[in-house]
Image (cartoon, rainbow, N blue to C red):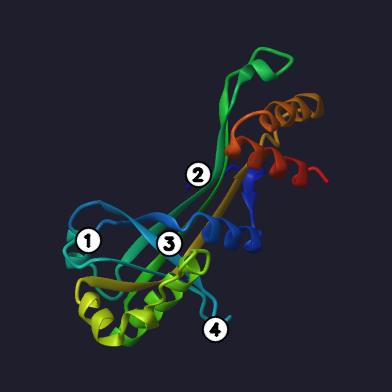
């Protein structure tokens, strides 16, 4: 990911937030050919010395049929993003897009059956906890879950490089910056999120 210095972040709390809130991300590989799969991802921080991304895809997916231990992949997370109109500036310029993103490059480690089971437990718990009548993995019965697991390909991605980008009009003078915030506060949900982020980095 190309990141001009002005937009580069080293804030790993921001990285965690972007991954947590935008977990349906792209798993990209280039074994034999370039492939990309949208999949649910989680950041595993059980061991602070060995933080990694975990996910699973269908075993029928061609990507699952080619990936093996040690292969390099890219996990691409897009956070809040919104259009920035040039009409919001006090001068002629071009329109642009404000956004937050994280890219994690890493090496694949294939999950064991027990690791995949634990992964599915955590993933299900994360999203079922908010349902009216949550159905956890334990409620399904181990035999049923293990049967369904035969169709899942679980993998851990051990990071080799992490890039965090926060492009929030940092290159604009204060008058334009505040006007962008005002316009975004009256736009859609993503626009309002970006407005709040812009307020925070100017504090």
Query: Dot 2: what SS?
Result: loop
Read off the residue under disc 3.
105
Q: CA distance from mark 1 to mark 2?
A: 25 Å
Read off the residue under disc 2.
2
Circles 3 and 4: CB atoms closer than 8 Å: no
Q: Can you tell which of label 1 and label 2 is closer to the viewer?
A: 1
Circles 1 and 2: CB atoms closer than 8 Å: no
Q: Residue at x 54, y 61 (%)?
A: 20
Read off the residue under disc 1.
63
Circles 4 and 1: CB atoms closer than 8 Å: no
Q: Residue furthest right?
A: 203
Q: Position of residue 189 (x, y in %)?
A: 59, 38
Query: Dot 3: what SS?
Result: strand
Relative height, residue 133 to residue 28 (above, below):
below
Q: Position of residue 70 (x, y in %)?
A: 31, 74
Circles 3 and 2: CB atoms closer than 8 Å: no
Read off the residue under disc 4.
47
Q: Position of residue 104 (x, y in %)?
A: 46, 60
Q: Residue furthest top?
A: 92
User: Left of 156 or right of it: where is 101?
Assistant: right
Q: Position of residue 181 (x, y in %)?
A: 73, 32
Query: Along the polypeptide, which appears first: circle 3 or circle 4?
Result: 4
**Mark 3 neighbour density, 10 Å: few (under 14) some (14–19) many (20 or more):** some
**Mark 4 neighbour density, 10 Å: few (under 14) some (14–19) many (20 or more):** few
Q: Nearer the viewer, residue 30 or 16?
A: 16
């Amino acid at each position: 990911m190309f990141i001009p210095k002005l937009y580069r972040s080293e804030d790993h709390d921001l990285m965690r937030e972007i991954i947590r809130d935008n977990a349906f991300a792209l798993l990209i590989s280039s074994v034999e050919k370039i492939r990309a799969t949208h999949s649910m991802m989680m950041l595993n921080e059980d061991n602070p010395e060995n933080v990694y991304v975990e996910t699973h895809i269908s075993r029928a997916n061609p990507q699952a049929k080619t990936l093996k231990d040690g292969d390099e992949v890219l996990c691409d997370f897009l956070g809040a993003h919104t259009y920035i109109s040039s009409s919001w500036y006090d001068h002629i310029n071009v329109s642009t897009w404000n956004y937050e993103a994280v890219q994690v490059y890493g090496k694949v480690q294939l999950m064991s059956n027990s690791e995949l089971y634990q992964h599915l437990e955590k993933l299900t718990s994360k999203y079922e906890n908010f349902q009216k009548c949550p159905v956890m993995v334990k409620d399904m019965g181990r035999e049923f879950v293990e049967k369904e697991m035969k169709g899942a390909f679980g993998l851990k991605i051990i990071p080799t490089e992490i890039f965090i980008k926060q492009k929030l009009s940092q290159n604009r003078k204060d008058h334009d910056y505040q006007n962008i915030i005002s316009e975004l506060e009256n736009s859609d949900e993503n626009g309002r999120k970006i407005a709040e982020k812009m307020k925070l980095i100017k504090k």
